[in-house]
Amino acid sequence: MVKIKSMTGYGKAVVEAEHGRTTVEIRSVNHRYGEIAVKVPRSLLAFENEVRKTVGDRLKRGKIDVFVQREEVAGVANLPMVNLPLAKAYRDTFDQLREELGLFSEPVTLQLILSQRDVLAARNEEGDEELLREELGRAVRGAVDALEAMRRREGETLLADLLSRRRNLSGLIERVAGRAPAVVTEYAVRLRERLNQLLAGTSLDEARFAQEVAIMADRGDITEELVRFRSHLVQFDETLQLEEPVGRKLDFLLQELNREVNTIGSKANDAEIAAIVVELKAELEKIREQVQNIE
């Protein structure tokens, strides 16, 4: 089963727990490589690299933006901790300063003590951190799942278009192959007619004539290009069946197909083939535009 995926998509997941809600949104667009930008609140900065790795393990190409939001539920678990020994130490220090400086009228207030560094600190219990990591992980994986589902749906649409245009390429190249043998024959007829007119009754050197036709046939021979073009089409079909991201491989094959078409156009020296070449190049360009959005 073909599993090509688009690089464009959006996914969102929300994980609700007793002490908070974690929301993850992921958006991806076309990009030559894989570029992941993660935006997390300060309370989740410690997990930023974990989020990036989780996303990167699943999404290989595209410009990917990850947005994480955290809403805490008010409760005891979210109240700050008081460092009581440190608070007492500050009080004793301030009392000593009052005595030393004779500032007996200056009270040591609770506000003064609480304003000192590290007297109040956010809870950072190991169990809470692990719960937060687990909730964040579930939200990230859920958002990636949703994004992947959208990318697969887009991929199905892209695949249908690619297969249709692939059939067009096959039909066009067979028209070129069918026309090629007639090119030499028609050239030989035109050349004989022209020479007979120029020679005005003088006998034609058949050996020299045959040599000229052979030279033209050799210069205009597109057999190798036709063989390579068909081979590249087979590789194109095989690449579409791969489980891995195939966008770059398809892009490379399109370059090779375009190279063969250009060579056919330059060698064939025939108006009908030249017109088919224009159609081939137009079809290849449309396929290339679609392939730019394939992971």
Image (spheres, helix red, strand yellow):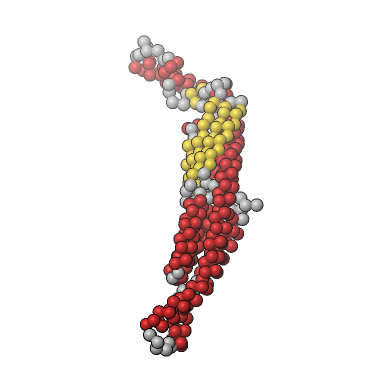
Residue 48 rendering spot, x and y as whole percentages:
51, 39
Residue 164 rendering spot, x and y as whole percentages:
57, 54
Foreground residue among 101 and 4: 4
In this figure, what is the number of numbered marks?
Answer: 0
What residue lies at 57% left-to-right and 41% top-to-bottom?
150
What residue lies at 49% left-to-right and 60% top-to-bottom?
280
Q: Say which quarter of the image contains residue 266.
A: bottom left
Could you tell whether 131 is left or right of 91 in the image? right
Foreground residue among 43 and 25: 25
Q: Say which quarter of the image contains residue 204.
A: bottom left
Residue 226 rendering spot, x and y as whole percentages:
53, 68
What residue lies at 39% left-to-right and 88% top-to-bottom?
202
What residue lies at 44% left-to-right and 77% top-to-bottom?
190
Q: Is residue 172 above or below residue 203?
A: above
Q: Name the residue at the front extreme.
A: 201
Q: Is residue 52 visible?
A: no
Q: Say which quarter of the image contains residue 144.
A: top right
Could you tell whether 115 is left or right of 179 in the image? left
Q: Name the residue at the top extreme.
A: 105
Q: Is residue 56 above or below residue 16?
A: below
Q: Name the residue at the right extreme.
A: 1
Residue 196 rendering spot, x and y as whole percentages:
41, 83
Foreground residue among 139 and 207: 207
Q: Is residue 186 visible?
A: yes
Foreground residue among 69 and 85: 69
